[in-house]
Image: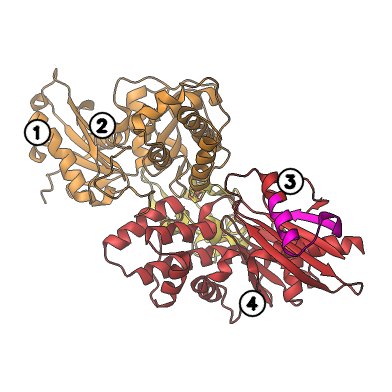
Chain colours: A red, B orange, C yellow
Amino acid sequence: MITAGIDMGSRTVKVVLIDTEASGAPSVKKTHLIFPGDLDGDAAAEKAYDEALSAVGLKRDDVSSVYATGAGRVMVNFAKEKVTEMSAGAKGVSYFYPNARTIVDVGAEEGRGIKTDGTGKAVDFAGNEKCAAGAGSFAEAMSRALQLTLKEFGEASLRSDKTIPMNAQCTVFAESEVVSLIHSSTPKEDIAKAVLDAVASRVCAMVRRVGIDKDVVLIGGMVHNPGFVSSLKTAMDIDEVKLPDIPEFVAALGCAMLAAEAKH
Amino acid sequence: MSEQLNTSDKKPEFWRWQENCWADESKDWRSAKAITVGIDVGSVSSQCVVVADGELFAYNSMRTGNNSPDSAKNAFKGVTEKTGLTLNDVHMVVGTGYGRVNVPFSHKAITEIACHARGANYMGGNKVRTILDMGGQDCKAIHCDDKGKVTNFLMNDKCAAGTGRGMEVISDLMQIPIAELGPRSFEVDQEPEAVSSVCVVFAKSEALGLLKAGYTKNKVIAAYCQAMAERVVSLLERIGVEEGFFITGGIAKNPGVVKRIEKLLGIKAMDTKIDSQIAGALGAALFANTLVQKQGPLAPIVA
Amino acid sequence: MIANYGYKDGSGEYYISIDTDKCIDCPVGRACLTGCPKGMFETMTDDYDDEVVQIKQSFRRNLAYDCADCKPSSNRPPLPCVVACTPAAIKHSW
Ligand code: SF4
Ligand code: SF4
């Protein structure tokens, strides 16, 4: 049985198609991501969905059920159900790490901690949405100010062992602070580390509100930022943070899994 | 350099406020018994106010420079050039504002909260109860009694939303000088809904989205000003809004935000003939005057 | 005077309000200073020459995170600072 999950983020649309056997074991058939640009939400969802299907030679009729999640999930008209990012994320993580208890989800626009019951169900969450300072876009803005790509930015921070506290707690004010650090000839590595430490400590404080239990899994775009992962480990005072292979697709995958379960 | 940063000198400054210097020509400071000075070093602009026998005599307002001590000195220098008054003629100096502890010639530092309330009480009279001060990097909401003593306050300097910086961002984005934002925000066929994001970063992307969707610049500015007004009103509501509403700081000059705040509150802001940007420095000078009455004058601190 | 320390940002409101009139004759020996595990409170002389307490500057822009340990997401237990201050001068906006 084929099911689909669609994650309508603020900047990207992600689609995951999975094939679930009668025994219940799912396998990922296709992951697909588009940047909708000027497209409207529903049109973008349709486009991403159809592209994903045709890439593996499937038609809409072959799909038993579609679930949607993400900030723009209401715009996905053809989805049968809409689920929160928390439920979708928790479910998706269970595909990779059945023992996950704490999920840290840091995307561009939000950072949150999710506590799961060990069976892929979210039982509690705490987040800091709608303030750009608590999420990946804070790091993005600062990497722009340093004229580094996000990747270079993350790598640079790994080369620093300094701890410079950032005073500004707001993305807008922090940009000026970073500029003055540049002017005072602070090495880029140290600035990058200061920025990632700041995001990590904010995210970590949120996660503490739900409690930190092993295994801890990080999902969302920041998985690709090794500097952030390292700062997060330090902030949470743990040795290991598990990183799924397809971190951006975890929520869409979780959706597809929930869709399959509902059919069973 | 990122397009969001105003650091290059070549870039036009869309956010620069007018600097100005004023003295009451009808008065002669030489005949005053007590001359006190208040210096307000803010993050964006700095003011120096001279009070002669408890009455406003002169002021100077200018953009804050690279460091607080120099900004304080320059603010005072402007007054000296205009009136001939020097530090040796002053009986006490009180510093306020974010750089208050770095005013090299001040005898005492008092918070801007207390000074704004005191200054507003002078400018608007003893009916003033609710004071809003929107500065370059913060927003203060103050409730005070009939003597200008603070009874409830908050200051938000964490989040750029609802601060002058928030306006600078939109001014920069639209490439329209900050002083034109207010008037332009009323040149719309229909008042748009407020931008929904509080966060300046997200509001900025929303504003870009609106432009793409065919909004005129003026309409986007209107939506942004409305959001700013709603934001400020939510801060005011925390401290309790009462009649006798007085607005100080740079925002007072932006009718685009002020008129919308008035509409949301259903209260008109009080009029004042004096430049409301000087409220903090004026309050500081008045505190100094009270101190001189109580303790006598202090020798000037010449750095 | 009611002093509100903290902020409101895109994600919510985070204020600690201190009714400083109640601090002036504190009957519990400034219990908030030691009651808060983060040591956020300090004494000061305010602009009207009263000795009261305030939130240290370094915490004021960070309350959402600094108080997070006392504020689990699932329930609202009594906060140590609020418990310590029997005159009820301290309030959190959560
Ligand atoms: S303007 Fe700054 S503090 Fe405010 S919500 Fe945005 S990032 Fe957060
Ligand atoms: S909630 Fe906890 S950390 Fe916050 S002020 Fe109170 S005691 Fe301190």
Q: Is mark 1 within 8 Å of ligand 1?
A: no
Chain label for disc 1: B
Residue found farthest to the bottom? A239
Range covered by the magenta-colored residues: A47-69
Q: Are marks 2 and 3 on the same chain?
A: no
Q: Is mark 4 within 8 Å of ligand 1?
A: no
Chain label for disc 3: A
In this view, the mark in front (4 or 1): 4
Q: Crowding near pointer 1: few (<14 within 10 Å), some, many (20+)?
A: few
- Disc 1/disc 3 C-alpha distance (Å): 64 Å
Give how far across and how far down residue B107 sits, in percent: 21, 46
Name the residue located 54 percent from the left edge and 32 percent from the top edge: B214
* Residue kind at label 2, given as amino acid type: Gln
Q: Earlier in the sequence, mark 4 or mark 3?
A: 3
In this view, the mark in front (4 or 3): 3
Mark 4 lies on a secondary structure that is: loop
Rendered image quadrant of residue C82: bottom right
**Most foreground residue, A210 or B110:** A210
* Residue kind at label 1, given as amino acid type: Glu
Image quarter of the C terminus of chain A:
bottom right
Label 4 sits on residue: A242
- Please tell me the numbered disc located at residue B81: 1
Q: Are marks 4 and 1 in contact (CB under 8 Å)?
A: no
Label 3 sits on residue: A74
